């Protein structure tokens, strides 16, 4: 009879029932694993979103600080016009201010500070708050307010949101380098109109970057020539300009090229060397 469990045909189906239970168990385990992985994925997405949101908030804090300071400098559409800076107003906020850096055609329009060391303004604002961007700052070993030593150095972060010195770092592309014709560094003693000369890379622990004075003009020019030899972008007439150069302003920021990381993993540096326009004009005129 079809319903008789004693029939041989029915007895042969019993292993199939047990196999179905085992298959169901495996499916249940796979389902639990799938749910677990979904939960882990959601947690990771939430964590990543939190990190992204926190980073954006840090960028926002920095932007707010710098927008407040930007109110103390008036810039003009004509790149040949120097910014007008309210030094008294800036000093009421922080007496460490030494200059103002403005690069027409970019977002670079910032006050420059000088601390007791090169850590003070790395991640602190002019008002003393911790901010991811810090402030632009001059090397503590330079003579204030800058453009006194044969090399003055200003440091700024390479932030991936396009602020601070990100656009300086981008000048390792020759087309972008060529787009920047004027850089203004203004102090309470007067404006300095500069032009980009060259950009080179270095490791963070390369102390040859931080040379401020030289024993002779020949030694100084040899130093600048060595920078030109390892430059990644430069003016075509850089060699001629170097022969008449007496001062440079070097803008230093991070780069993210692994070959320039030092032994402890600190990222490399991109250095833009700028020369006063008056010295450029004099050097080229003397060789015609």
Image (cartoon, rainbow, N blue to C red):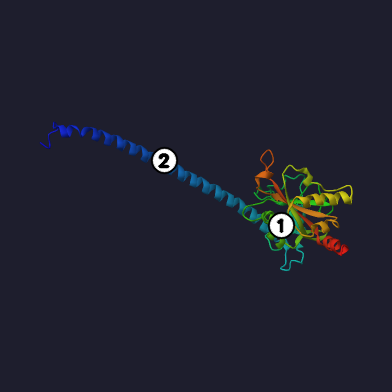
Judge from the rendering whether residue 158 lies leftward or rightward of residue 8; answer left or right: right
The N terminus lies in which quarter of the figure? top left
The C terminus lies in which quarter of the figure? bottom right
Q: Is residue 45 above or below residue 239?
A: above
Question: Which residue is at 52% across, 49% downward?
Answer: 49
Q: Kindly state the secondary structure of the residue where label 2 is placed.
A: helix
Identify the image quadrant of residue 184: bottom right
Question: Which residue is at 76% across, 55% downward?
Answer: 198
x and y percent of residue 161 in the render? 62, 54
x and y percent of residue 103 in the render? 72, 60
Q: Is residue 108 above or below residue 46?
A: below
Q: Residues within 10 Å of mark 2 (few under 14, many from 20)?
A: few
Judge from the rendering whether residue 54 lies leftward or rightward of residue 144; answer left or right: left
**197 and 266: which one is in front?**
197
Tell me the CA gap for discs 1 and 2.
49 Å
x and y percent of residue 153 in the render? 77, 51
Q: Residue extending furthest left?
A: 1
Q: Which residue is mark 2?
A: 36
Q: Which residue is mark 1?
A: 110
Q: Tell us which disc is closer to us: 1 or 2.
A: 2
């Amino acid at each position: 009879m079809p319903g008789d469990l004693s029939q041989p045909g029915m007895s042969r189906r019993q292993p199939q029932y047990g196999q179905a239970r085992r298959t169901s168990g495996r499916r249940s385990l796979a389902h639990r694993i799938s749910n677990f992985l979904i939960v882990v994925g959601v947690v990771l997405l939430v964590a990543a979103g939190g990190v992204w949101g926190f980073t954006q908030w840090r960028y926002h804090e920095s932007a707010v600080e710098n927008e407040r300071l930007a109110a103390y400098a008036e810039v003009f559409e004509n790149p040949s016009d120097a910014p007008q800076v309210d030094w008294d107003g800036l000093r009421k906020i922080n007496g460490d201010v030494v200059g103002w850096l403005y690069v027409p055609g970019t977002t670079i329009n910032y006050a420059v500070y000088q601390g007791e060391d090169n850590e003070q303004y790395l991640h602190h604002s002019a008002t003393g708050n911790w901010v991811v961007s810090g402030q632009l700052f001059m090397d503590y070993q330079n003579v204030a307010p800058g453009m006194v030593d044969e090399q003055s150095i200003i440091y700024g972060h390479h932030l991936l949101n396009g602020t601070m010195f990100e656009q300086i770092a981008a000048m390792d592309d020759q087309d972008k380098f060529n787009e920047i014709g004027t850089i203004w560094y203004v102090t309470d003693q007067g404006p300095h109109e500069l032009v980009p000369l060259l950009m080179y890379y270095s490791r963070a622990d390369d102390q040859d970057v931080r040379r401020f004075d030289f024993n002779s003009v020949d030694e100084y020019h040899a130093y600048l020539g060595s920078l030109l030899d390892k430059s990644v972008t430069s003016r075509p007439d850089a060699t001629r300009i170097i022969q008449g150069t007496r001062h440079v302003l070097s803008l230093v920021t991070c780069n993210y090229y692994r070959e320039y990381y030092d032994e402890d993993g600190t990222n490399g540096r991109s250095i833009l060397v700028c020369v006063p326009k008056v010295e450029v004009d004099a050097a080229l005129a003397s060789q015609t």
